């Protein structure tokens, strides 16, 4: 008999869907959470999309989800800055998800002498953006980055993730960023606060050992790896610290 | 009395000019080399310009110089690949200097399954270029980069150099590049071969300890630091290995 939990943090890609296809067992799992009145939050390192876009996609799969059930690393990054400095000015580089999150927190966009440089995945990255960010960091701006993922899958293979794009600034300035997303504890602490739950009563669920499961381990949450995505059963065996649970499918979960 | 040398390798920015202004003592120094029939080569980590562009600039300062007196790190990168694989295909990212050097060596430009990925300073860098490079390196392409400089001065301060731009690919793939430029020995070996001289009879001259002087030290050449550029007299004192000579100006050199 497994421990019972009040709340569940769920990763997205590889856990509830794969690319454009839903994972039916995950859809049923979330429906059951909803029926049982258990709390849940989708926690994603994807910084490019807004919470509304994510909620719309999940709803399209039949998953009960509103924008309020989503915490993106862009939202967590903006909240982190807001909590540190209410009226911070930020030079942010990223896509719609990061821009919307910064505007939602009423943080001022500032290119020349910002308090913060915030970096998120930007497929329109330019040398000029990098140059502005480096000058600001060298002038003392605090440097945060949405997430440390070094690679992302696309249809051709593994392409650069936010962690590798961020490295231009850290290598050039010698200043390491504060990473916000999984496996860092910052996004998990925000998720618990948003759900009003505690780490003891919450389960972290994901397919990627190095982001989802490590995030749970580092933040003191129990964790469940579902072998439907990045981490294979074999790769999992090589990890020195194991997740609390490992399942081939969320349909195996015993409530 | 200092040792006499047959040949001289000279850095450019900070050594023979500063930005758009020549350093008159350096102009006179090179004129004297020419008059005395001593060999010299300008060796630069700037990968963006062609040898003709560099020669034209130096000639404009009154320095005796043709394209044949210039070795850019782009030229050294193309030569390195050519020497390794005569008919190599290369996915190269960079500006005019790198493109011209690759074409000069008759290396084939190839995006999809190149033998090599060659990275040089590119102020038109895009996510798509990075993605192609990462896919190629993951597919086994050998990864070379023109130079490891992490920062460059512009009118506002220090902006990203080629070494930091290169890090996107190395961080994303986990594959470290072979750097060609100073302080690596590769470009120095090519310079000696081009001049037909030996390391014992050649002096490396530059203003930057971490590139020019280290290049000399690592390659077994005597070195002369001229305190007209990046490295200050105070910074020089902190270095565990000292250059053979340190001068405030090239006018102090005793032939």
Image (cartoon, coloured by chain):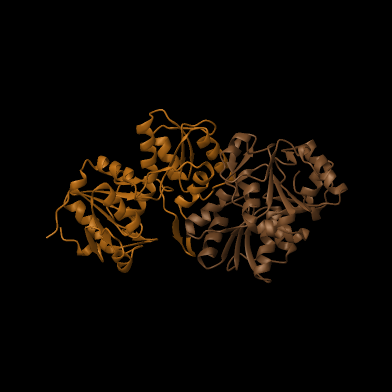
Chain colours: A brown, B orange
- The answer to whether residue A52 of the structure is visible from this angle is yes
Residue in the picture at 52% in, 68% down: A139
Q: Is residue B18 above or below residue B35?
A: below
* Residue farthest to the top, as pictured: B87
* Residue farthest to the right, as pictured: A35
Name which quarter of the figure residue A253 lies in. top right
Q: Please state which of residues A45 and B223 is positioned toward the viewer in this rendering.
A: A45
- The answer to whether residue B67 of the structure is visible from this angle is no
**In the visual, does A114 lie left or right of B44?**
right
> Residue A25 location, x and y as percent?
79, 37
**In the visual, does B9 lie left or right of A186?**
left
Q: Is residue B215 above or below residue A248?
A: below
Q: Please state which of residues B83 and A155 is positioned toward the viewer in this rendering.
A: A155
Q: Please state which of residues A27 and A226 is positioned toward the viewer in this rendering.
A: A226
Q: In the picture, which quadrant includes the C terminus of chain B? A: bottom left
Residue in the picture at 24% in, 62% down: B246
**In the visual, does B130 lie left or right of B154?**
right
Q: Please state which of residues B23 and A161 is positioned toward the viewer in this rendering.
A: A161
Q: Is residue A118 above or below residue B85?
A: below
> Residue B234 location, x and y as percent?
31, 69
Q: Is residue B205 above or below residue A1?
A: below
Q: In the picture, which quadrant includes the N terminus of chain B? A: bottom left
> Residue A90 location, x and y as percent?
63, 65
* Residue farthest to the left, as pictured: B1
Name which quarter of the figure residue A243 lies in. top right
Residue in the picture at 41% in, 50% down: B148
Marks counted in the figure total 0
Residue in the picture at 68% in, 48% down: A223
Name which quarter of the figure residue A156 lies in. top right
> Residue A228 location, x and y as percent?
70, 36
């Amino acid at each position: 008999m497994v421990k019972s939990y009040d709340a569940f943090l769920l990763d997205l890609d590889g856990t509830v869907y794969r690319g454009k296809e839903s994972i039916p067992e995950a859809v049923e799992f979330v429906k059951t959470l909803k029926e049982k009145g258990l709390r849940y939050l989708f926690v994603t390192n994807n910084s490019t999309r807004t919470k509304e876009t994510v909620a719309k996609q999940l709803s399209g799969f039949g998953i009960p989800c509103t924008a309020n059930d989503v915490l993106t690393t862009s939202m967590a990054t903006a909240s982190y800055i807001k909590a540190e400095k209410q009226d911070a000015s930020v030079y942010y580089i990223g896509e719609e998800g990061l821009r919307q999150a910064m505007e939602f927190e009423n943080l001022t966009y500032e290119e020349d002498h910002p308090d913060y440089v915030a970096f998120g995945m930007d497929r329109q990255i330019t040398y000029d953006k990098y140059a502005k960010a480096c000058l600001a960091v060298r002038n003392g701006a605090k440097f945060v980055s949405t997430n440390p993922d070094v690679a992302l899958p696309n249809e051709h293979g593994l392409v650069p993730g936010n962690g590798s794009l961020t490295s231009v600034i850290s290598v050039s300035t010698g200043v390491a960023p504060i990473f916000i997303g999984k496996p860092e504890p910052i996004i998990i602490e925000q998720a618990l606060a948003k759900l009003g739950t505690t780490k003891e009563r919450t389960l972290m669920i994901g397919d990627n050992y190095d982001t989802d499961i490590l995030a749970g381990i580092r933040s003191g949450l129990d964790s469940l790896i579902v072998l439907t995505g990045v981490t294979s059963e074999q790769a999992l065996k090589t990890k020195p610290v194991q997740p609390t649970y490992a399942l081939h499918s969320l349909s195996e979960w015993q409530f």
